[in-house]
Amino acid sequence: IGEIISELEAGIESKWHTYFEFDDSSGHNIPSQWDRSGRAMDELQGLPPSGETHRHINWYQDACKEGKEMSDLDWKALIMFLTRAADIGLVPMYDLMNHHNGRINTRLEVDGERALSVIALTDIPAGEPIFNTYARGGTESSVDAFNTYGFIEDYPQLWEWTDEGLMQLSRKNENHAYGRYGMGNSDAYREDGLRFVPNTEHHEVLVISPTLAALLPTKALVYTLGNARRPMADWEKLIAAHHSNLRISHANALADSAERTLAGLPTTIEEDELLVREEKSRLKKAANLSTVDVDDADAIRAIEYRLAFKKALRLITKVVERETFLNDSDEL
């Protein structure tokens, strides 16, 4: 970020001046840029990433600015880095590639000199999009993608949250099934004889389509995101096999958590769908009058995001009701 600031300060003398002029990252309002007390924050309704939206800003101010206010140049450099950088830094042209975990058609290679190569996985016809991913191998969820880049992923989506209530029960009772079978404890899974390792310690659901999802997906299932394409028929077979090896108590616990989360939110899915239509109509009228409020635009984005999250939570219950899981005697 410091190097970006130095090059920005050099102005037209910087060899990256044309690249910086082309950059449009400052034109996209990501959650890090939301008003901390604005409407958009409230519209998340406490769902993740509530409480984490400004973590990048907080880190930069504490670690690099010693608590001082950020200048316009600091903001421009930080947002540019957050939204455009690869693991090795800013790479012109690479950062023009589109994100899509399900339609990935490239892979990346970094050599010993930190040179980045983008290699096609298949023939890409002229005029067709080149798809990359910003969340390789399932290390970042749809929550992370929204928090960092400000967009809601198309399918497949990986949603995650933490059930504090269930965790507290396991802390109070060491014999609670959650602690014994460790939903998120890979060692416990192996000791229990199950042949998979969960992706994270969070509650997770991998949503492939509006009707297909993997509950508590494995690292192997999630790794496909951004690394390969997978036909729907293959997803169906793999998810069925995964669920047949997933304890019914774990599936029920996930469904219970999803239902509790939905029940605790102030609006329903149907209410949010109506609200989005109304808010977009109102925003369009305001745009025609050149009176658009940035906070209103951010709020709509937050509502659309929470709606997608809620739909994923509702799908969990439907999956538990219709699919077959590993029978066991313990209930979480």
Image: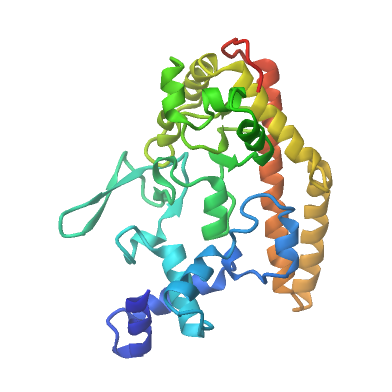
Q: Where residue 100 appears, x then y in whole percent? A: 47, 46
Q: Camera-side residue: 177 or 222?
A: 177
The answer to which of 1 and 293 lies nearer the viewer is 1
Q: Position of residue 235 (x, y in %)?
A: 49, 25
Give the quadrant of the N terminus.
bottom left
If the image is split into quadrants, where does the C terminus sit?
top right
The relative height of residue 241 versus residue 36 in the rendered view (above or below) is above
Which is nearer the eye, 175 or 310? Answer: 175
Q: Is residue 280 above or below residue 308?
A: below
Q: Nearer the viewer, residue 165 or 251?
A: 165
Quarter assignment of residue 323: top right
Q: Is residue 165 above or below residue 26?
A: above
All told, the count of numbered labels is: 0
When asked about the image quadrant of residue 308, the answer is top right
Q: Which residue lies at the image location 41% right of the left edge and 27% below the top edge? A: 187
Rendered residue at 18%/53% (across/down):
111
Residue at x-position 45% and y-position 53%: 98
- Horizontal arrangement in the rendering, residue 198 relative to residue 155 (left or right): left
Left or right of 111 in this view: 277: right
Residue name at image x 56 percent, y 27 percent: 179
- Rendered position, 195 above or below 178: above
Residue 294 appears in the rendering: yes
